[in-house]
Image: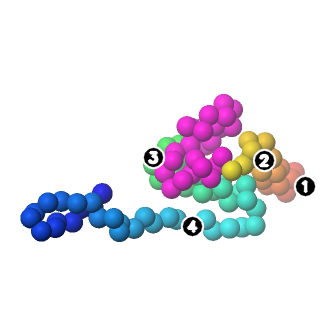
């Protein structure tokens, strides 16, 4: 928190401190956008994103996802089955090209 000095030398909180939010770059696929956003937030906090996301998908416990940059609230916008569908869709699209 930022403090300003007023007359008499007392410190008071600066009520005009600005909070900066990182915007999501949208691809047109909400599940993909949110997964990538959460991945970046987990990585920024030093977590292994794959392990944390898998923990969340298996347990449903949102505390596997950091609240950094509102990642937890973002991932809670999706149902877990929507996330799994996106992961399977991506995996099969990538591997179907190799199998052909």
- Spatial CA distance of label 3 from label 4 is 20 Å
* Residue 11 occupies quadrant: bottom left
- Asked whether 4 or 64 is in front, the reply is 4
- Spatial CA distance of label 2 from label 4 is 22 Å
- Earlier sequence position, callout 1 versus callout 4: 4
- Spatial CA distance of label 2 from label 3 is 26 Å
- Please tell me which residue is depicted at 39% across the width and 67% down the height of the picture: 18
Q: Are marks 2 and 3 in contact (CB under 8 Å)?
A: no
> Which residue is under mark 3?
46
2 or 3: mark nearer the eye:
2
Q: Are marks 2 and 4 in contact (CB under 8 Å)?
A: no
- Earlier sequence position, callout 3 versus callout 4: 4
Q: Secondary structure at mark 1?
A: loop
- Spatial CA distance of label 1 from label 3 is 38 Å
Q: Is residue 8 left or right of residue 46?
A: left
- Spatial CA distance of label 1 from label 4 is 38 Å
> Which residue is under mark 1?
100
- Asked whether 37 or 91 is in front, the reply is 37
- Asked whether 63 or 37 is in front, the reply is 63
> Which residue is under mark 4?
23
Q: Point out the stretch of residues depicted in magenta.
A: 49-76
> Which residue is under mark 2?
82
């Amino acid at each position: 928190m930022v403090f300003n000095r007023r007359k008499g030398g007392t410190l008071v909180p600066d009520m005009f401190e600005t909070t900066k939010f990182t915007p999501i770059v949208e691809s047109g696929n909400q599940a993909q956008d949110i997964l990538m956003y959460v991945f970046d937030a987990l990585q920024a906090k030093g977590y292994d994103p794959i392990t944390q996301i898998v923990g969340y998908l298996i347990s449903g416990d949102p505390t596997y996802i950091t609240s950094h940059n509102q990642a937890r609230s973002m991932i809670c916008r999706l149902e877990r089955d929507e996330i799994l569908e996106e992961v399977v869709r991506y995996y099969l699209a990538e591997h179907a090209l190799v199998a052909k």
